[in-house]
Image (cartoon, helix red, strand yellow):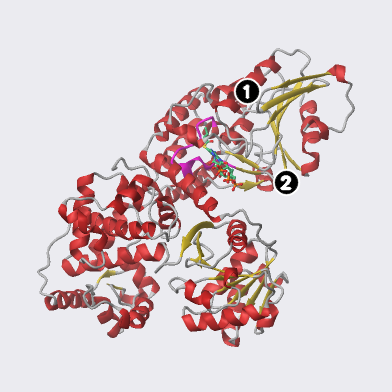
Amino acid sequence: MPTQIGWFESRSRMRHHAMAVVTTLVRSGVAIITLDSPPVNIGNSTLRRELLAAVEIVATMPEVRAVVLASGLPDFYAGSDIKEFDHPVEAPRLPAVIAALEALPCPVVAALTGFVLGGGLEVTLGCDARIADSTAMMGLPEVTLGILPGAGGTVRLPRLVGVAAAIDLISSGRHITAEEALRLGLVDSVVPPDTLLDSAISAARALASKRRTLDLIPPVDPPARIERAIEKAAGRGRARPNVTRAVGLIVGSVTCDPADALVLERQAFDELRSSTEAINLRYLFFATKAAAKGLRTAATGARLSHIGIAGAGTMGSSIAQVCRTAGFAVTLFDSNPAVLERATISLAQARPEQATDGAMTMTLNAQDLATVDVIIDAVFEDMQVKKDLLGLLESVVSSTVVLASNTSYLNLDEISQGLRRPERLAGFHFFNPADKNPLVEVIRTRFTDDATASTLAALVRTLGKTGVPARVGEGFIGNRIYTDYRAQAEFLVEEGAAPHDVDAAMVALGLPIGVFAVSDMSGLDIAWARRKRLSGSRNPLERYVTIADTLCEQGHLGTKTGEGWYAYPDGAKRGIPSENTAKIIAESRAAQSITPRLFTSAEIQQRIICSMLVGAAEVLASGVAQRASDIDVVMTAGFAFPKALGGPIRFAAAQSPTWLMEGLTASHQSCPLTFALARPATTGVMPAEVVALLTAVGSPLS
Ligand code: 3HC
């Protein structure tokens, strides 16, 4: 910003042009064009128009010998405005703005700070040099939105960093630090934040001539390196045609006329922008932001630097690693020395640097949690165990410390009732494996106060997790809906489908793995233990499939025993259909007097999606979820429902009323008690709760 410039100027030698979001200041022959469109310099039509106008004005000023493109905000430019992608993009389009920058007769240096993403990074590729400060994070995340860079990214980036690195960056969409950008040759130097503008001005003055990226000869990559990058991208591009297309454009761009390559890229960008996949991914982008907003309150949360974790089992130690990786000091407590010892060993193996950096403390003494800011309880899923532990912890810590309970199913209102300060407790539900799964459900109880909610909203954000607000209810959002999926999958098997038919149908829809394969991987005994625990409260009129119980009784617990829903001969990783399981299934059908019938893949998908819809409608109607879109965020982030479909609700909302009616009717008929909400569908009426759910995510149903 002008005030930061460390050299003296008399007013007579300064010229200043200001528009709403772009300011140009000319000093001693250097034009500084500053972007200032809060919050993160989103490239909308106003920004593009003003930037182009600024460049055109500078082009008419003979005294300007160099240009610096800078930001007046903590971020340089977060990319094009995604909201504009739903309509034809207004002129000037970004390629025209970049072409104007590139055509300026004098050198242009971009001064990069904070986020430099998508179209923002492409603007800098049209400059003659790039100086970054140490806060800069750069990337071309377009593929995560179902599109590809549309303003020269696939053409200019390979000329700067080589084909292999360009494929890696564009196909992953990952953000890189300034240091990595320097190593790759994407930026020319990295400087401390307080010297960025001065450094960019000096660099601009020092550049003797233009250095257009389009004129560069791409760095030579060994063919094997390019092959590896293409293979890796193909792995990432599973069911992602935009990734494959981006790779083709990058490879082709370096051997053809760059002007032609730019045209081809823009054509692909425009086509992909209106694809269903891209529309769904944009929906999920804003749904995720809405969920994050839903976590926040007006109250001020606590300042966080030290997190305590109670329970050093698999989940607790994994959460400890997540907290430590995010920069918190961590104290991990467990009263069982053997458990703590195992956690210490597994941490040393998984993250040796964390085990030795002094910021992770293992303790057998709960008193050592006295100084932490938040405690995450990750002990065994048992009401009494949790109540006892949280009661003890409450007596150890100060009255402002937040207690966050990681539970999948337990009633948090009941847990809170035993506390002296129930307002300081909320649920904080991680999904296994906590270090890889991005989802955390943040559950407010009847008592949780706003300050506690704000503290946990900030914690989720710092952990880099996708936070979704929820209220107390059986299984909260995700596990509740997954339970309906699993129940319907078992009904289908009992009625005639094979487990692998059900799994294959859902994989064909885009899920990475089916529900029966997942059960085998996690162990059938986990759900079995829960079923036994709840057996007393089960409604005897509710349909209950006994196949999984029989498998467990016979000792077939999944991959760990070599047999479950599938057989795993000789320790195979992928299961094959099991004769024994088929026999158990046949016996179960006979016991229920069910004549098995064939199911098509489409019918399986329809029944399962509609069963999830019933669960989702109940979750929304009961207030356990705040928004319909929160449910799609949960199911895509936490349960790997394909993002390209937007989530189960969004997918269902795109289906015809006939499809929905048939699916809801079949769900209801499969178990009138479990899927009671779908009853109106059997008489040709769409349940009101389902209408509310679907219209909230954009269905024209109402
Ligand atoms: N378009 C529209 N809105 C955007 C946006 C974008 N590209 N980037 C951020 N926003 C909005 C957010 O929705 C949010 O709005 P809200 O306050 O009303 O909810 C606000 O800006 C602030 O963003 P965040 O809350 O996300 O702030 P964070 O600090 O958490 O994250 C960020 C900042 C990393 C920039 C993150 O917002 C992000 O990843 N944005 C998307 C970046 C992106 O994908 N850019 C590429 C766009 S496609 C493109 O450029 C095409 C080109 O090739 C032609």
* Helix, strand or loop status at disc 1: helix
Query: Which residue does the image show at 48% across and 76% down from the upper left?
Result: 414
**Residue 514 visible, this orientation:** yes
Q: Quadrant of the C terminus?
A: top left
Q: Mark 1 and ligand 1: say if the CB distance to the nearest ligand atom is below 8 Å.
A: no
Q: Which residues are magenta?
A: 139-152
**Residue 603 visible, this orientation:** no
Q: Quadrant of residue 201?
A: top right
- Picture coordinates of residue 227 (x, y %)? 48, 46
Does 391 appear above or below 659?
Answer: below
* 105 vs 696, nearest the viewer: 696
Label 1 sits on residue:
50
The mark total stands at 2
Q: Label for residue 134?
A: 2
- Picture coordinates of residue 454 (x, y %)? 61, 58
Q: Quadrant of residue 460?
A: bottom right
Q: Residues within 10 Å of mark 1 (few under 14, many from 20)?
A: many
- Name the kind of residue labelled 2 in the image: Ser
Residue 503 falls inside the magenta stretch: no
